[in-house]
Image: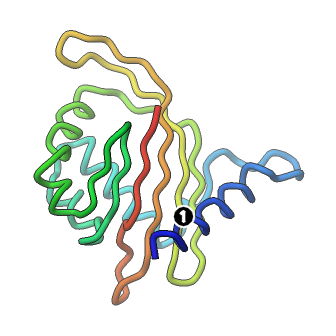
Amino acid sequence: MIAKTMILGMILLSSVAGAKEPSPSLVNGLDLPVAKVITTFHQGINKGDKQAVLAALDPNVMIFEGKGVERSKAEYAKGHLLSDIKFMQSMTVTRIEQHIVEQGSMAFSVGKNRIQGNFHNKDYDFISTESLSLHLVNGVWLINYIHWSN
């Protein structure tokens, strides 16, 4: 299932990135039903709402960040979730680009943000990219794949 999700994501990303038509908006898909889960997930991390973050995740979510990977919601909850929340609460996030595509029971979001702030007396100012894959489970959208990089 992860392989199918990643292939769908690559296809969707290439269709967005390879458009030959006039430049589309750099933010689209926010009106789709799946966007609410994505927004709630982001707000949860930025505001420190651990329950909102976990509610958006599939139990078998795979999260790739830097050189590491967490292979479930439980592993993320015990691992990097709290440090991600603490870090992001010290940052200002400016959305540069986000594309959300919903296709049947699968959806994909790709985005780019500028992240700025000070954490543990260190200044940060970088561009971060994010890929999210979601699937519909019993009428509820859940994130089943995350890749963050900068």
- Look at 27% across and 60% down and name the residue there: 71
Question: From the viewer's perspective, is 150 left or right of 54?
Answer: right
Q: Residues within 10 Å of mark 1 (few under 14, many from 20)?
A: some
Vertical relation: 107 (above or below) 120: below
- Secondary structure category for the residue under label 1: helix
Q: Nearer the viewer, residue 105 or 95?
A: 105
Q: Residue at x 47, y 31 (%)?
A: 150
Label 1, on which residue? 6
**Residue 6 x, y percent position in the rendering:** 54, 64
> Could you say where residue 65 lies in the image, as x and y percent from the top left?
36, 42
Name the residue: 24% across, 57% down.
53
- Establish if 134 lies above or below 18: below
Instruction: Give the camera-side residue of 33 and 3.
Output: 3
Tag 1: amino acid: Met
Query: Residue 115 lies in what quarter of the image?
Result: top left
Residue placed furthest toward the left: 78
Q: Position of residue 90 (x, y in %)?
A: 24, 26
The residue drawn where x is 88% and y is 52% is: 21
Q: In the image, is 11 to the left or to the right of 119?
A: right
Label tally? 1
Question: What is the image's colouring?
Answer: rainbow
Q: Describe residue 44's horizontal placement relative to residue 105 as left or right.
A: left
Q: Residue furthest bottom?
A: 138
Q: Can you give x and y, in whole percent of width and height, for residue 107 in the image?
A: 52, 70
Q: Nearer the viewer, residue 127 or 75?
A: 75
